[in-house]
Image (tube, rainbow, N blue to C red):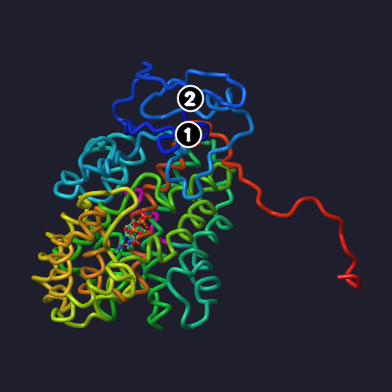
Amino acid sequence: MSGGCSTLLSQGLLGSSRQCMAQEASSVVADSITIIDNRTGNQLEIPIERGGIAASEWQKLLPGVWFYDPGLTATAVCDSSITYLDGDNGILRYRGYPIEQLAEHSTYLEVAYLLLHGELPTAAQFDTWRHEVTYHTYIHENVRKRFLEGFHYDAHPMGMLVSAVAALSTFYLDAKQIFDPESRRKQIIRLIAKMPTLAAAAHRFSVGMPFVYPDNSLDFCSNFLSMMWKVAEPRFDANPVLARALDILFILHADHEQNCSTTAMRVVGSSHADPYSACAAACAALYGPRHGGANEAVIRMLTEIGSVERVPDFIRSVKEGTGGRLQGFGHRVYKSYDPRAKIIKRTADEVFAITGKNPLLDIALKLEEIALSDEYFTSRKLYPNVDFYSGLIYQAMGFPLEMFPVLFAIPRTAGWLAHWQELLDQDSKIVRPRQLYSGPEARDYVPIDRR
Ligand SMILES: CC(C)(COP(=O)(O)OP(=O)(O)OC[C@H]1O[C@@H](n2cnc3c(N)ncnc32)[C@H](O)[C@@H]1OP(=O)(O)O)[C@@H](O)C(=O)NCCC(=O)NCCS
């Protein structure tokens, strides 16, 4: 089976329940399925490889018959070696490394290297990588003065980020050379390095504070916190526990295979747009409340519940369908506890030891306790996801709610770029799906005075 956009999983339609085990890739045909077209009696044996059926095989039997799969819930749109996710068993690995080990021992910058290069760096490789990312943190003065400062005073920082990332493509014209390895490398470093600068600049502008230049003597997260919070002191030294907590959150958010924003990145990248334009599309996808906005929704929900005593009533209203969904619960892929949520819960304790406990924590813990023992939630396999606790941490660290999707975009840039690079290396086809047409039959134009 060839990789790329032509590979379609058809588990739902064809009744196979196999998992796509990308990390156990093998070219051996493991299994097959026989399909009979009852209209003609034609039959075809189609190989199933790594849980997938190639669309090219399917089309041999039924040319012009399309899978109807609007949310791409049963369709593998690519063949990727970056992230492995087993939602039934709560497993997440980057390039084969368990997320738990990376969160405990690694740093975001090292994880970004791993995602982009496929291997952990040697000490020398990491030094070069860190140096390059550190020295590309500055943004062109015109990005700030002419562009960012042109926004309305109460602009949403995520809206500013989406636009600023797209605007970078007009500052780095060499970015169009997407098949030149040196140009590609340079844009990747620029994007990873400049995201925190743009993010902090968007926040400072939206609250009327002056821009803070990057401090290249600081590590990635401490530098970001300095650009966020520095006032008049000559140097801002972030609390190391908070900087490390942010680093862990960045590791957990660095990639999550074919989520909505990564798919947007791959779709736009497949047209051979430059990486800034593709990244802006990915940021835009992340802006939506169903994706990057879920942890904000959790905070709003907890605030609305208001006290531990009101939790049972709220759970009842969710079950009766009058209270909306339990935000931060459930996941399209994870059908057991989200492994990232477990790590985040530990990180939350460390952060609260410094910042003081977020008063909403007790409500969250009660919600979790009741939901995990309630048949409504357990029978639907609804468990806390990464967003259930991440918002509480960000809020305790002083980030306003509007910054939550921005905080997600900073680390996810590494994942987006890893997928962008991979699809270019695979020489993937342009993404161009089919549709089922349900509009009117052909009809003649009626002049306006006769309608
Ligand atoms: C993440 C999410 C969109 C996944 O949705 P999905 O895989 O399409 O699942 P469905 O919408 O098909 O839901 C399946 C069932 O569980 C219920 N359900 C799903 N998530 C629920 C939640 N958070 N609270 C209450 N019920 C929920 C649905 O009502 C549905 O019940 P039904 O079978 O009786 O109709 C969904 O779980 C959700 O909205 N969660 C809250 C938002 C959130 O935390 N998003 C962040 C994801 S990282």
Quadrant in the rendering for residue 448: bottom right
Q: Given the image, on which type of amino acid does mark 1 rest?
A: Leu
Compared to residue 102, the image places residue 23 above or below, namely above
Closer to the chain start, of discs 2 and 1, is 2
Reply yes or no: does residue 126 show up in magenta: no
Q: Considering the numbered disc 2 on the image, is that residue within a helix, a strand or a loop?
A: loop
- In the image, is residue 133 part of the stretch drawn in magenta? yes
Residue 271, x across and y down, in percent = 59, 43
Badge 2 density bin: few <14, some 14–19, many ≥20, Cα 10 Å: few
For the point 23% across and 52% down, the residue is: 338
> At 19% across and 59% down in the image, what residue appears?
375
Q: Residue at x 35, y 48 (%)?
A: 132
- Name the mark nearer the viewer: 2 or 1: 1
Image coordinates for residue 401, horizontal then vertical, percent: 33, 74
Q: What is the count of numbered marks?
A: 2
Foreground: 384 or 401?
Answer: 384
Please state the extent of the stretch shown in magenta in the rendering.
Answer: 131-138
- x and y percent of residue 316 in the render? 23, 73
Which quadrant holds residue 17? Answer: top left
